[in-house]
Amino acid sequence: MPNLKLRPTFEIPLADGRQQVIEKLRNEYQRIAPSDLFQMFGEYGELHLPSIEHRLWSPHLSFYVAERDRVSLIHGRFAPRLEVWTLVWIIHLAMAFTAFFGLALAYSQWFVGESLWGLAVAIMAALVIVTLYIVASIGQQWSADQMASLKDRLDELLERAGVAKP
């Protein structure tokens, strides 16, 4: 089920060698004058949206030049902006710890014959995680147009850099 992936990925096979592609992208990066919208760090690069287009769940596109079975390729991944992604993971971790300790408390309560209110805490934490996942999936669908725009920009960048596709 592809719409359940929170960080969609794709691969673009290339005809040029890995080092050639990195060099061509580095030259294009230097030619267009570095900006916040395109960054290149060795074999890794990022494409961002202008801040005026940002929505809560706006993505950025990270990519790196890889080689598999002697074929060069661009491995791209869409993800929420770093500040949103960090918040999502902080909430996930906090709720996972809460669920774990809620279950441990519930076990202790069950063992001594007390009321199992720790189980309710664990269930609520699990519900928060599921809710966050659903909200993230909906946010991703709302930003599908921005993901398509970033993918188009990557294709244009590869074309301008002279990177050959098979």
Image (spheres, grey):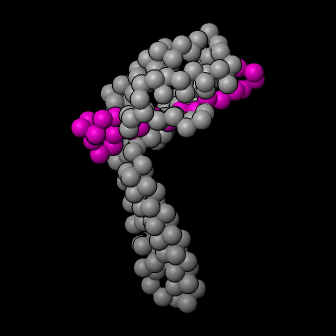
> On the rendered image, what quadrant is the C terminus found in?
top right
Q: Residue sitting at 55 percent across and 90 percent down?
A: 112
How far across and down, in percent of the image, does residue 143 sit?
33, 34
Total number of numbered discs in the rendering: 0
| Image position of 70 (left or right of 141) | right
Please give left or right for residue 76 compared with residue 137 in the image. right
Q: Tell me where residue 34 appears, x and y as whole percent.
A: 42, 33
Q: Residue at 62%, 17% (x, y): give it.
A: 14
The span shown in magenta is: 48-72
Say whether residue 128 is left or right of residue 1.
left
- Give 85 or 27, whichever is nearer the viewer: 27
Asked if residue 60 is among those painted magenta in the image, a careful observer would answer yes
Q: Residue at x 72, y 26 (%)?
A: 68
Foreground: 34 or 159?
A: 34
The answer to whether 11 appears left or right of 123 in the picture is right
Of 134 and 119, which appears nearest the observer? 134
Q: Is residue 50 above or below residue 165?
A: below
List x then y, in percent, for residue 35. 39, 35
Above or below, 92 relative to 81: below
Whether residue 125 is visible here, answered yes or no, is: yes
Q: Position of residue 153 (x, y in %)?
A: 41, 23
Q: Is residue 162 above or below residue 119?
A: above
Along the line of sight, the residue nearer the viewer: 16 or 132: 16
Q: Please, which residue is most extreme toward the left here?
A: 52
